[in-house]
Image: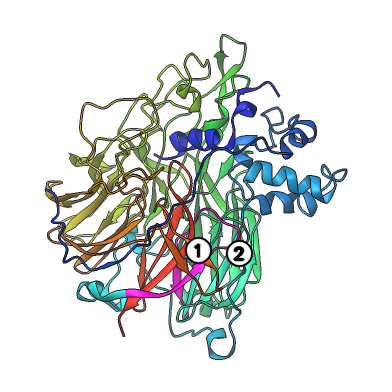
Amino acid sequence: MNRLAVALNQTAVLTLLALAASMAHGAETSSIPEVSPVDDPTFSNKASAPHEGEPLFAHHCSSCHLGQVPKAPHKMFLQMMSPLAIEQAMSEGVMRPQAAGLSAEERHLIATYLGGDLATHPAAPRCEGKAAYFDARREPATGSWGFSPGNGRYIPVSTTGLSAGDLPTLELKWAFAFPGALRARSQPSVAYGAVYVGSQDGTVYALDLDTGCIRWTYRGRAEVRTAIVHEAPAAARARNGTPLVFFGDLNAWIYAVDAYTGRLAWSQKADDHPNATVTGTPAWHDGVLYVPTSSLEVTSAADTAYECCTFRGSVQALDAVTGAQRWRAFTIANPPQETGKTPVGTRVLGPSGAPVWNTPTVDAERGVLYVGTGENYSSPADGNSDAIIAFRLSDGSRVWQAQKTAGDAWNAACMFPNNPNCPRESGPDVDFAAATILLERPSGDLLLAGQKSGQVYGLDPSKGGRELWQAGVGRGGIQGGVHFGMATDGARLYVPITDMLDGHDGKTHNRPSRAGLHALDVATGKVVWSTLADNVCGAREFCEPGISQAITAIPGAVIAGHMDGRLRAYHAESGRVLWQVDTAREWPTVSGETAHGGSFGGGAGPVVADGRLIAVSGYGIYFHMPGNVMLVFGPRD
């Protein structure tokens, strides 16, 4: 094994993925209601001793999974998967013929070498009696990803069952341990008296909202990172069927399952590129599921022998009932072509990249769909990267695009001195990773977009995305700026800023971090208030004070999970902290086992519905503290 990727241990691989994929002070007083943390160590991401599965992988797998076979996922991609999913693929899935000569023990060793040796927790108890039944009258809560007007992440009181005044009285009602997991990245959804959530091993759970018992489970092919999206109940009634739920997995498969039984209705591969993935939650609208695709090919380019790059981002429209494709639109219109060779003779292909990391935003009035794109993966950088693009709902044709950072081509090779696969542009890698927000107003609609550069934009959707205002909110950078999701209540735009103190990219900054939560006037972009996050990390590894995870607004408050494990509620008008809990601790769970919280990160923002605040803790990758818990809070009885 003489290639760069093979020489990297799992921790180093996660470091590459971190850089590739991510993207006035509030008063702190002792009066802030808080659930006291337990003083115990967090999980560690430290590298382990050589693994027995390494020579097995080298002998049986490396000839295909180091970039040589176009349809075979690269080793770096496999290391993002759960070992349970890898082992299943070899024993009964797509890799069964290739693994036929391996013993069960050898398959297990390869799987744990790639995915890590995860402890398995017993599942929660199965529901019995009344807790096992779904209540059709309790329709899906709106305001979060995929089944929400405008992607504004604002949840009205009629849905929340909580007011800002209730927040200081919140206490833990129950907690759920994700079995065999070191990270929690799927945003829960609430409907029919149940909580729906995905997990690292590919299992989707429907849990009773009141008790946490399991109503049903469905096992996908790989980690489910997206939120669980609900079909509108009226649409299900119109076809005389039960409602469906939708989600995507790490291997770019999309699923539709029965919301009441968990039975599979259909599954569909979103993209056949070997490193394609679904990060942004699909969006349901009027019987159509709009699916974004991104990829981790950006990491494969660290291998000097890898021909970078062939992936290009896309969004497609699927019939929500059958899974049939209606159209597919690429962010880069034409497939990449050879543009030259590196000094070591590796072909360079481009333009490539411009992935779609975020949930598409439906604008039914104008008949268009908005997505934000990431950087190009290889030279030449083109006009499609770091842009907001509008596609026609009817056929996927491009209506307009508004690029905000030109000349951005970057991949993981740029982390290494003199790696020939680094594009000549060498960054800055400032994706639009957060979903674009469509805010409908009598005075004129707005598109609100936040970028990893730390810039936030107000655009006019009626005039081709013409810029109305721009605000520099964060310092920005590869591990800075806006990552996964802003929120708005119509008057203010709430902007979470990551701005990691240690970006793990070898760069120094001449501007201070602006990590924390900021509120802007939606009409002008002017800052209304800023609450910078205080640093309570101390010596904890992979701990940062900023906000990478998507946030959620309710009337009078904004709820945000920080990378240091704190879940906080902020006063909407002042930024004052109303309530907080340190989740980076051990938690007793409904299974009888102890789970552990960690960093908040990704698109799995807090959910407020039916009188409960629900959050998943433990991003566990990209320099974040691991964890495997979902926490359900409610007012004191």
**Residue 620 among those drawn in magenta:** no
Q: Determine which residue is flagged by label 1.
A: 595
**Quadrant of the image containing the C terminus:** bottom left
Q: Give the number of the disc on residue 121.
A: 2
Front residue of this view, candidates 84 and 140: 84
The residue most toward the bottom is 129
Residue found at x 34% / y 77%? 634
Q: Which residues are magenta?
A: 171-192
Q: Dot 2: what SS? A: loop
The amino acid sitting under disc 1 is: Ala
**Residue 176 among those drawn in magenta:** yes
Q: Is residue 144 left or right of residue 568?
A: right
Depicted 416 relative to depicted 58: above or below? above
The residue most toward the right is 101
Depicted 328 relative to depicted 418: above or below? below
Where is residue 424 shown, x and y percent of the image? 43, 16
Q: Are marks 2 and 1 in contact (CB under 8 Å)?
A: yes
The amino acid sitting under disc 2 is: His
**Which callout, 2 or 1, points at the residue further toward the start of the chain?**
2
Q: Is residue 356 left or right of residue 481?
A: right
Mark 1 is surrounded, within 10 Å at the Cα level, by few (under 14), some (14 to 19) or many (20 or more) other residues, namely many
